[in-house]
Image (cartoon, helix red, strand yellow):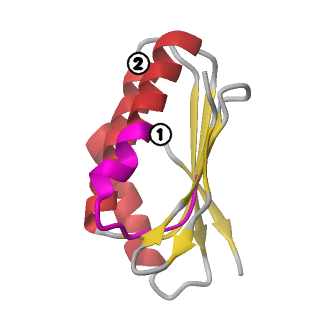
Amino acid sequence: MKNIYIKGSHEAYFIPTVSFNSDTGVCELLGESYLEETIKFYTPLFAWIKEYTADIKNKIHFNFKLTYFNTSSSKCIVDIFNMLKKFKDAGGSVAVYWYYDDKDEDVEEELEEVEDFIAETGLEITLVPKSK
């Protein structure tokens, strides 16, 4: 199974950096996710997670280090959480970490969104504060 690495960019739209490693099971989304074609961008990531959880079945450790994400990205993040929850419910080992800037003035809004993700998916997400 191939790893995925996409270098993030800030042009007309913001593309997050993606690093999915099939050898270690460590997956990361970093930066900002504000895309014109969000579904098109996230579809290969969904496919990778489905393949990894169906074929590799090793532990998956997911780090979300997003500083900004729009509504369409939020929906894709929920889809990722649902896939991870399904894998966990089937006996897979899943650890999910959400990194947030505890000095950011909008942190309460971000944490409310993460709490909504937890409520919607039933997936345990560990919140990790990081100061700039």
Determine whether 20 is above or below 58 in the image.
below
- The residue positioned 38% from the left and 47% from the top of the image is 42
Horizontal side, residue 111 vs residue 64: left or right: left
Secondary element under disc 2, as helix, strand or loop, is helix
Q: Is residue 36 magenta?
A: yes
Q: Residue at x 32, y 46 (%)?
A: 78
- Label number found at residue 75: none
- Quadrant location of the C terminus in the rendered image: bottom right
Is 53 left, or right, of 42 in this rendering?
right
Q: Is residue 28 magenta?
A: no
Residue on which disc 2 sits: 89
Tell me the tag on residue 124.
1
Q: Is residue 27 left or right of residue 75?
A: right
- The answer to which of marks 1 and 2 sits earlier in the sequence is 2
Say if residue 29 shows up in the picture. yes
Amino acid on which disc 2 is placed: Asp
x and y percent of residue 105 in the render?
50, 88
**Would you place residue 95 above or below residue 103 in this image?**
above
Q: Amino acid at mark 1?
A: Glu
Position of 72 with respect to 57 (left or right) is: left
Could you give the CA–CA distance between mark 1 and mark 2, rounded to whole angstroms? 12 Å
Span highlighted in magenta in the image:
29-44
Q: Quadrant of residue 89?
A: top left
In the picture as drawn, the residue positioned furthest to the bottom comes out as 105
Q: Is residue 77 visible?
A: no
